Amino acid sequence: MERVRGQFVALGLGMIVLVVIATLINRGPIVLPMLVVFTAAGAALLLWARMPRAIVVVDFAIMAASVVLLYWLVSATPLALFLLAAFATAREPRRWLAVVLALATGAHVAVQLALGQDTIVTALATIAGVAFLFAVSRLLVSERTQRVQIAELLAEVEERRQQEKASDMLAERGRMARELHDVLAHTLSGLAIQLEGARILSTQHAVPAALRDSVERAHQLSRAGILEAKRAVAALRGDQLPGPELLQELVDEHRLAAGSPTRLIITGEPVPLDADASLAIYRTAQEALSNVRKHAPGAAVEIMLSWTPSAVILEVIDHGGQISGDPIAGHGSGYGLTGMAERAELLGASIETGPLDDGFRVRLTVPIDAVGPAS
């Protein structure tokens, strides 16, 4: 739209210059003051994009009066009148500009006949030329207006489609949240109650210390599972998603569940990330720790989160020897390293996984400029 307006302004200014040059060549510098008024009024009409409607009418009237006076004083070329016809449709209020154009055309024809230099046929030809240019300009403006309206309608339809899509997605996420809450959260709550009873019994009777510790860890894990289920429900309902700030909780849960040395190392200055990037970092660390518990139980684990000017880098390294089984499949984890790679690809991030001499490494690199700040 701006490009079309720029082209129109350039063409209009070119036509004004043409009228000025043609008049100066035929009549000399005597017409210079009147040409200055004509040029200033025309340039203002073209360049002042937010000119008030009342001033538009006054400016156009000044331009029209200068055209009539130019012809009356020095019998200048009627090209300026045709230019006026083209300009009459360029701005609102177009009805008033059409009235001014009609009056100017009538005055111009009257001057033509009064000077005796033109015949009635010439005067009629002038009127026809003005009417033709006005009609063509009006059609062009109408076509441009229709294109703008069509573009606005298409944008409105697309916006409504996106709103409907978002509404459907929100409804589906609500349904999933209810199912998760009613099934998984309730099951975990029952498990936690049973484990709490077992933990109390283990303290009242002579049971092996290993069994007591195992029941205690199972109880703590069930509580952690309830908390994670609540977070998942909150995420589905659009609440705050977990991110890098909760990595320490993951480390504590893993240390409790696996009974192995686990530490978190954070370097650099944290920066805000959008929700998807924050969740990707959290879920990648969560899945990597889950895989360690499955494939290298008891292995020491290091989680390193590095904030650099260009990227956030998450590394999860275990020192439990070569992982057995198929880590890519995730053994029923529901996510696995394949899920990590898919989530990273959607973000424009990269993930590297592979064995080390004494263990396994997962490395996620999230470019800062790709994920943007938190909204």
Image: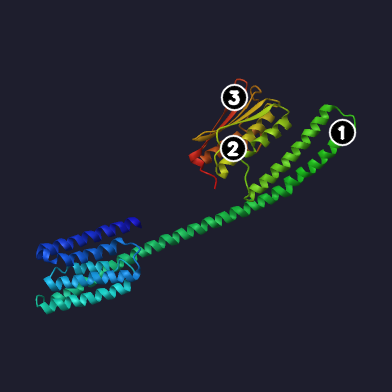
Q: How many marks?
A: 3
Badge 2 marks a residue whose secondary structure is helix
Disc 3 secondary structure class: strand
First-in-chain label (2 vs 1): 1
Q: Residues within 10 Å of mark 2 (few under 14, many from 20)?
A: many
Residue 281: give its label: 2
Instruction: Give, as a three-letter code, the residue at label 1.
Output: Thr
* Looking at the image, residue 270 lies above or below residue 10: above
How far apart are labels 1 and 3 at the CA level? 42 Å
Tell me the kind of residue under disc 2.
Answer: Ile
Residue placed farthest to the front in the image? 33
Say which residue appears at 21% left-offset and 62% top-offset. 16
- Answer with the quarter of the image where residue 318 lies: top right
The x, y position of residue 224, in whole percent, is 72, 39
Q: Earlier in the sequence, mark 1 or mark 3?
A: 1
- Residue 263 in the image: x percent, y percent? 66, 29
Pair 1/3: label in front: 1
Q: Which residue is mark 1?
A: 203
**Residue 82 found in image quarter:** bottom left
Q: CA distance from mark 2 to mark 3?
A: 20 Å
- Give the percent coordinates (x, y) of residue 285: 62, 34
For mark 1, give the secondary structure.
helix
Q: Which residue is mark 3?
A: 355
- Label 3 is placed on what type of residue? Pro
Q: Is residue 19 left or right of residue 288?
A: left
Instruction: Answer few, some or many: residues within 10 Å of disc 1's Cα (few below 14, many 20 plus, some between 14 and 19).
Output: few
Q: Residues within 10 Å of mark 3 (few under 14, many from 20)?
A: some
Q: Residue at x 58, y 39 (%)?
A: 280
Q: Using the image as rendered, state which of residue 62 and residue 131 is in the foreground.
A: 62
Q: Residue at x 40, y 63 (%)?
A: 149
